[in-house]
Image (tube, grey):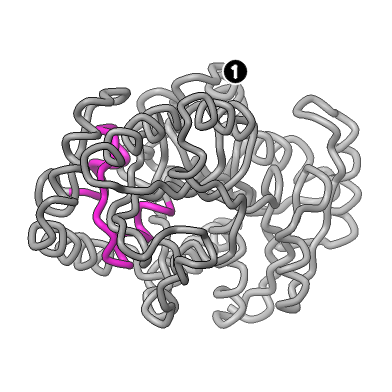
């Protein structure tokens, strides 16, 4: 496959989740005879610049909200200008947009994807179910997500492909732990970490409560990396509980893996997910994981072997599990090694890229 031009479309290109994964894939597929052109429905985000610095062409459709139909006209214009051989879209709005306007100029394959199990945004479920038949193939990033796509959204099993999230293991191994002084964390305290987009579905109050208890019992500090719509509310909660000297909120950082290597345990209390990047990065970085007992986390973690799973919102159980790991370094190390071996088996980035290029070949061969 030489010079296959692929338009890779996301709803936005803000740091976190799917956009970061898309950036990694775009950089990696170039080595497999693919020319990626990466864009967003939303205005330019930080990842546009990073992609351009890597020599990858980008575009933005400047949507001013989730229902700005004018961005569809701008996307149609970009599709005509770029003239890709296929369109690879991810996230709800990008999926629907690609299906609606991706073939207005000529026939081409449309490849879409689901990265999370929707339990709160019901209109996303309806929109995917109503337009999904316009995709040639649809990808899911975890077995539980694939089951959701088939059983809940009604996609034909024959048109669903599993593409796990990938981790660049060599890049993880090359990173040194972040200096504690950069984050104002004392040298002699255990650290609990969370990283990602601060969204209500992440249940960050459980993280705050868990760190408060761990500080009381083990002198632990917390590290909350990221930004998003919940940031102001969580910062207010931290302040109201007089934890500003304990829970550090540095915003977005490009060195998440370095921060994971600094930490002792990842606290991950999400109510819903797909195949969470930060959990896989923690597993690769040998940072112990305590996560919510939801299907996507069960896809990654074998309970009590490679991580500890707790019921959603169960603050007592999260605090107890994390405290157990902080109190027993041997158990923490053993669990972390099992977790690393598990992520090596199924999520090495080069294996994932090979599968993606195979899916590109398949959809192109269908004509």
Name which residue lies at 72% across and 68% down: 50
Picture coordinates of residue 345, whole percent (x, y): 24, 67
Residue segment shown in magenta: 277-301
Give 232 or 118, whichever is nearer the viewer.
232
**Taking 75 as reference, is 56 left or right?**
left
**Taking 160 as reference, is 25 left or right?**
right
Name which residue lies at 46% across and 36% down: 243
Is 280 magenta? The answer is: yes
Picture coordinates of residue 142, whole percent (x, y): 35, 46
**Taking 130 as reference, is 102 left or right?**
right
Picture coordinates of residue 331, whole percent (x, y): 9, 57
Mark 1: few/some/many CA within 10 Å (<14, 14-19, 20+): few
Q: Quadrant of the C terminus?
A: bottom right
Q: In the rendered image of this protein, does residue 6 appear above or below residue 104?
A: below
Q: Quadrant of the N terminus?
A: bottom right
Name which residue lies at 75% across and 45% down: 102
* Residue topped by disc 1: 123
Q: Quadrant of residue 188?
A: bottom left
**Taking 93 as reference, is 366 left or right?**
left
Picture coordinates of residue 157, whole percent (x, y): 37, 38
Is 62 magenta? The answer is: no
Give 1 or 72, whichever is nearer the viewer.
72
What is the total number of numbered labels drawn onto the structure image? 1
């Amino acid at each position: 496959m030489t010079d296959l031009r692929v338009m890779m479309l996301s709803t936005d290109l803000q740091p976190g989740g799917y956009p970061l994964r898309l950036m990694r894939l775009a950089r990696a597929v170039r080595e497999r005879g693919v020319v990626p052109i990466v864009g967003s429905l939303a205005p330019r985000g930080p990842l546009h610049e990073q992609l351009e610095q890597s020599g990858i062409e980008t575009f933005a459709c400047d949507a001013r909200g989730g229902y700005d139909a004018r961005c569809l006209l701008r996307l149609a214009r970009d599709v005509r200008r770029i003239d890709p051989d296929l369109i690879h879209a991810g996230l709800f709005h990008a999926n629907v947009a690609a299906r609606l306007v991706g073939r207005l100029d000529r026939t081409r394959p449309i490849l879409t994807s689901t990265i999370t199990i929707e339990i709160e945004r019901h209109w996303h479920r309806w929109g995917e179910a109503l337009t999904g038949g316009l995709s040639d193939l649809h990808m899911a990033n975890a077995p539980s997500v694939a089951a959701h796509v088939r059983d809940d959204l009604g996609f034909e099993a024959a048109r669903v492909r599993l593409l796990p999230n990938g981790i660049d293991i060599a890049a993880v191994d090359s990173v040194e732990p972040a200096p504690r002084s950069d984050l104002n964390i004392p040298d002699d305290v255990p650290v609990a970490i969370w990283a990602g987009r601060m969204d209500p579905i992440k249940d960050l109050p459980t993280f705050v409560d868990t760190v408060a208890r761990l500080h009381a019992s083990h002198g632990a500090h917390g590290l909350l990396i990221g930004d998003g719509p919940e940031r102001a509310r969580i910062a207010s909660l931290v302040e109201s509980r007089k934890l500003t000297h304990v829970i550090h909120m540095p915003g977005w950082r490009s060195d998440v893996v370095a921060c994971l290597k600094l930490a002792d345990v990842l606290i991950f209390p999400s109510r819903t997910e797909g195949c969470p990047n930060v959990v896989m990065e923690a597993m690769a970085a040998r940072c112990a994981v305590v996560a919510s007992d939801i299907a996507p986390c069960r896809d990654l973690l074998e309970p009590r072997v490679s991580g500890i799973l707790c019921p959603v919102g169960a603050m007592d159980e999260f605090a107890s599990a994390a405290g157990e790991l902080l109190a027993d370094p041997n158990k923490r190390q053993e669990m972390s090694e099992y977790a690393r071996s598990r992520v090596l088996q199924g999520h090495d980035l080069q294996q994932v890229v090979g599968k993606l290029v195979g899916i590109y070949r398949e959809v192109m061969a269908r004509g």
